[in-house]
Image (spheres, rainbow, N blue to C red):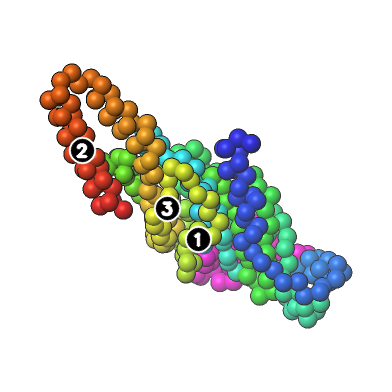
Amino acid sequence: MDKGIAFRCMPRLILPCLFLYIVNGQTYTDMSNLYTDIFTSHQKSFIPNSDFSTALNVTLKLYLLAIVRFDEVDETVDVSTGIKLTWADAGLNWNPSSYGNAEFIIVRHTDVWTPKFVLVNSVETYEPIGKDYDVFVTIYYNGSVSIANGDVMSAKCTANVYKFPFDSQTCDLNFVVWGISANNINLIADSYPVGLSFYTPNSDWSPESSTGETLLWNGYSNFKRTFTVKRAPLYYNIVVACPTILFSLLRSKTKNEQSFQILWIKDTMETAIISYTTSV
């Protein structure tokens, strides 16, 4: 399978694992009646806030699934990212005892209102994240709604190759609910805003640190994820440093030149080792 296709399929395969449910023995009739009763008069065309004098709180958590690519020339980073969102829908609640003690129901995301997240520093598109995925939402009896979505995202990231190939790169992913201001939707970072439980290692880059915070940006409630990745230098040492050293030795004509080259190589390698150890 093509590597790009595999990474794009990854969120669809992994994200359902973000939820773990306990079945309480409801019958098909119980769930059918529950679905009919809560959706008969349900409105999904507007924000389901119980009090429109305040913003609807949406709690957000990101999962780093994979580092797909970092391009130093274009200064872009591609990451496979999962997003878990939770909010309260004022129009969805019920008494579990009336439906076989059913405390939740899983339905298609098109049945309810969902926030449309956009990566604002994207280099490809400003369409809602995961818009082409047929995902599900979990609705709890108290009106709490959760959805897990994601995609392979390409974002602008300024490169710093001063310590190449022992460098680390720090990038940001900025998310907003496009078209809805902070007066209507307030993003809240989860107590553990960034997760690595589904991360797939990359041979070229490894995650060093990752943080998540919410802030106000141009009138929008913005979730900002900052992460640092470290380059694995072994490949570049083999394909760049070693051939350069051997070529330099072969071009030396006298013993003095060879001695000088050996000393130069020794100093260069020591400098590289010091640079590597100080960057770890």
Of the numbered discs 1 and 3, the one sitting upstream in the chain is 1
Which residue is denoted by mark 1 in the rendering? 195
Query: SS of the residue at dot 3?
Result: strand
* Picture quadrant where residue 234 is located: top left
The image's mark for residue 207 is 3
In this view of the protein, which residue sits in the foreground, 268 or 151?
Answer: 268
The earlier-in-sequence mark between 3 and 2 is: 3
Could you tell me how far apart the alpha carbons at marks 3 and 2 are, in whole angstroms? 31 Å
Q: Is residue 98 left or right of residue 168?
A: right
Q: Is residue 27 above or below residue 125?
A: below
**Type of amino acid at the residue the image marks with label 2:** Lys
Q: Is residue 172 visible?
A: no
Q: Residue at the location (68% across, 64% down)?
A: 138
Residue span colored magenta: 39-59
| Of the two numbered discs 1 and 2 in the rendering, the one whose residue sits closer to the viewer | 2
Q: Is residue 251 left or right of residue 5?
A: left
Q: Quadrant of residue 71?
A: top left
